Amino acid sequence: MTTVQGARRRRWLPFSPWHLVLVPVALLFALPLAWLVMSSFMTNAQINKFPPTIIPDSLHLDGYRYVLNNALFPRWFLNSSIVALVVVVGNLVFGVLAGYAFARLRFGGSKTMLTLMLGTLVIPFQITMIPTFLIMKKLGLIDTLGALIVPSLVTPFAVFLFRQFFLSLPREIEEAAWIDGCSRLKALWLVVVPLARPALGTVAVLTFLTTWNDLAWPLIAINNDHNYTLQLGLATFQGQHRTQWSAVMAGNLIAVVPVLVAFLATQRTFIQSLTSSAVKG
Amino acid sequence: MGIKLRAAVVDREAPSRRRPHARRSFGEAGTAWAYILPACVVILGLGILPMAWSLILSLQRSDLITPAEWVGLQNYDLLSHDPAFRAAVGHTLIYTALFVPLSIVGGLGLALLLNRKIRLIGVYRTLVFVPFVISATAQGVLFSFIFDSHFGLANAVLNWFDIPPQGFFADKNQALYLLVLIGLWSGVGFCVVVYLAGLQDIQSELVEAAALDGAGRWATFRYVVWPALRPITVFLVVWETLQALQVFDLVFVTTRGGPLESTTVVVFYVWQQAFEFFNAGYAAAAAYVLAFGLLLLSIGVRFARRRDHEVVRRP
């Protein structure tokens, strides 16, 4: 809020006085992350020094070496990447198809189906986790990456977001394509999907974030440490390597970087998609 | 664009008469079902079906291996007398009662602070929000390190101010509050961006009109800004409450419910019963108790909102 009536004070600082409040606040949020980065480039001896040094004396890569030479860590990274990639693609493909059908096609039971799907949004994960585990077990997927992929291959969130988006597109665009002899699927693929880029981006980023960051479900579905995701690996890794803090922090940073990159690259869209549902109610 | 004009007057069934051969056998409804089939299988098959299954489980004694036996409501009865479950509910409620108001107040305060046009404001906003995208696991690992009672940075900083070293996660009187603090560090950013969006939605005319009427800063906030943000506040209170009641990842990574069961929260309890002690029926019942609480909250808010909508907000 800017006050209109406040007369212009003489400037006693070369910058806005608000910075004096904002810098400490920003530091409060940034410092733990700064320490994460710094400590990952220290030696363990340096980390345990008292009083602590905040800046490493040089870029030590011991922690990174330790992590990357660990037989399992690169594999966890790969597992997380595979799961996230397949889940994101699945949500885009099946979410677009279902969202389009709900937005554009008339079929008996569409209302019922939509309501049922909407209903699943309010079911907490804790209720479904035990039976989902049992279903995955029956399908022979427990302790494979499949168990991590199938339950989130398409989420109601993606279906609804695409449905909302397609409802806002004028029908005439596709109809023009049909008249030019496109089948419905071809029109969807060639005409509608390219227009849906903002919705595709939103679903991709949010899906990636939740999949990459998940811990609870992998913890239940995976036993063999070869099939761990990065988050699950880190949670156990820190227990086993309590004395190797620089390695633990190096691994932690490696796990955080993809998400940070995804967020910083799409910051505006990301925040808009988060807030729009809230502000519009 | 001539085509588009023509298309606008074509009635919707026309294309079906000139459909390519492949789709003749299989009308609009068929296409639609084909399109939604994968979503239905996954979402309903792993949403509605497990929910019903869980309810059945909660009425059984089952370890997921040997055949289950029916016990009716016995699990629920046992739960109501189980001191460990009661403690878990208590911890969850303490966490929620601290986390929700603090994240709302903190989020609004920071949003007001960040809602101005000065240099670097974008950087400040980003820094406040970044912790939100970091996984609970990474947060847990990082803060276990920072609050390590022997090697942690936190005790080193306290030492600087001549404060004796603290136990932090090793101290049963501190661990839960520390979890709230970490939850706030990463959770407040979400409230900030939502409030910021709301603040930017408030028409500047309203604020200016208030100023013309001689309202000071506090009055403008109290009578213009706060009421305008009301729906957002309701949304955030619900959202953050749902998040807080379901806290798990952070607890699992940092304390595993310890020290001395001082941070066992409901979801951790459910997980432990199901996947450590193999009391699946009992765990399902505990999960249903939690879900029932969440449901009551959602329904309560629905009604409150409906009443809210009847009040015309914009003159």
Image: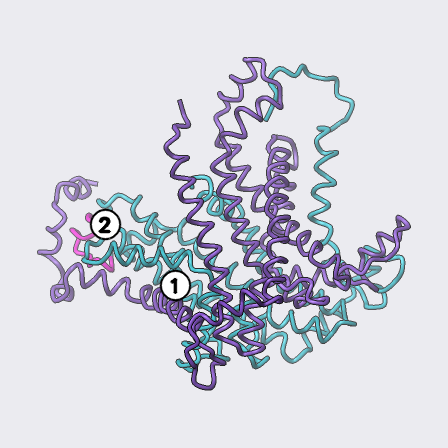
- The CA span between labels 2 and 1 is 25 Å
Question: Magenta part of the protein: which range?
Answer: A174-186
Q: Are marks 2 and 1 on the same chain?
A: yes
Residue A225 screen position, x and y as percent: 59, 79
Q: For the stretch drawn in magenta, what is the main secondary structure?
A: helix
Q: Is residue B304 above or below residue B183?
A: above
Residue at the disc numbered 1: A154
Residue at disc 2, secondary structure: helix
Which hue belongs to chain A? cyan
Residue corresponding to mark 2: A174
Task: Tell me what residue is drawn at x 59 percent, y 21 percent.
Answer: B219
Mark 2 against mark 1, which lies toward the viewer?
1
What is the crowding at mark 2: few (fewer than 14 residues within 10 Å), some, or many (at least 20)?
Answer: many
On the image, the x and y values in percent for residue B23 come to: 15, 64
Residue B5 percent location from the top left of the image: 17, 39
Residue closest to the eye, A194 or B89:
B89
Q: Quadrant of residue B41?
A: bottom left
Q: Which chain is purple?
A: B
Indicate the amino acid at tag 2.
Glu
